[in-house]
Image (cartoon, helix red, strand yellow):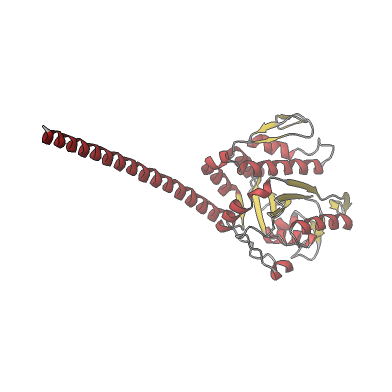
Amino acid sequence: MDDQSNRTQRNSSKKKKSATKIFLSILLGLLVLITGVGGYVVWRVYDDVKQTTEVMYEPAEEQEPHESRLKKPLVVDEGEDPFSVLIMGVDTGDLGREYTGRSDTMMLVTVNPNTEKTSIVSIPRDTYTEIIGKDFKDKINHAYAFGGTSMAMNTVQNLFDIPVDYYLSVNMEGMQTIVDAIGGIRITPPLSFEHSGNSFVAGEETHMTGAQALSYSRMRYEDPEGDYGRQYRQRQVIEATMKQIATLDSVRNYSSVLESMSSSMKTNMSFDDMVDMFNKYRGAVNEVEQIQLSGSGTMIDGIYYEIIPDEEIARVQEHLKDELEL
């Protein structure tokens, strides 16, 4: 009986070991499968982002480097150097237009990882200034029409005597698509008005779709601040969009976000630059300061221009140099 009992115990032990092996094998297989699927998803995200940035990438080949960058080139992979981005809302694609267009919206953004701060400077589109590459002065938004991205960057760079490191151009239709892709944005209007069938109430936080955000940023003539009021609302849209893109919900919806960006944006940021910025500069979006370049309107030869006083340019220039640690 003892031998039989021992054999029974050994067989039971073998069965337990076999069951344990089977369980461990299944668990290991599941882990391998999950890891493989996770790795595939990560690879797909990486590959999609890389392909999208390649479609968006367009170098500013004729941009003139600022002397400060010749002395100390910008390095973003260490996450320590502040940088600037010229954001241009161009009217190509607006109302069916297909020509090069003008940069009707111009904002110079500085990002400082050391102070964890971002500033957005609005430049009036009618600013009367020297157009770099032409032998005359004109409206600053004409620089893009005359010579594309490089001329616009060189002109803004000359106006403030600071480096313009990157550019990001967005067509008017594209902004609407991007806002929809990230699930809309939330903005508190500074005044009440109606535009293109949309109503906005002062002081009331509003969730806006892409069409509503575009309508909100376009209204000009009913604003008591005129074009300055419109520029403030444009800065609101840009800031809200930047913050929403940085949220987890937007990452989950990355496919539609990337698709909207690839069809609406152009930039000289490389894929590696974007990865470094996403990983090492996101903290700077937590605090956003809005700056308005201001002047007064006047007519020259029957054409309206915005004349910016030298002291006003010096004020904004000092701010930009501080933010860029120049």
Residue 91 seen in the current view:
no
**Which of the pair 69/281 is nearer the observer?**
281
**Which of the pair 243/130 is nearer the observer?**
243
**Which of the pair 29/217 is nearer the observer?**
29
Where does residue 321 sit, x and y in percent of width and height? 78, 59
Where does residue 136 sit, x and y in percent of width and height? 81, 63
Q: Is residue 202 above or below residue 159?
A: above
Q: Residue at x 73, y 46 (%)?
A: 288
Using residue 18 as the reference point, say whether residue 243 is left or right of it.
right
Q: Quadrant of the C terminus?
A: bottom right
Using residue 299 as the reference point, say whether residue 25 is left or right of it.
left
Where does residue 260 sit, x and y in percent of width and height? 57, 44
Using residue 82 as the reference point, say whether residue 14 is left or right of it.
left
Q: Residue at x 72, y 50 (%)?
A: 117
Q: How many marks?
A: 0
**Which of the pair 99/219 is nearer the observer?**
219
Q: Residue at x 68, y 54 (%)?
A: 113
Where does residue 186 sit, x and y in percent of width and height? 67, 35
Residue furthest bottom in the image: 71
Q: Residue at x 77, y 42 (%)?
A: 232
Q: Quadrant of residue 10?
A: top left
Q: Is residue 262 above or below residue 72?
A: above
Residue 151 seen in the current view:
yes
Residue furthest front in the image: 2
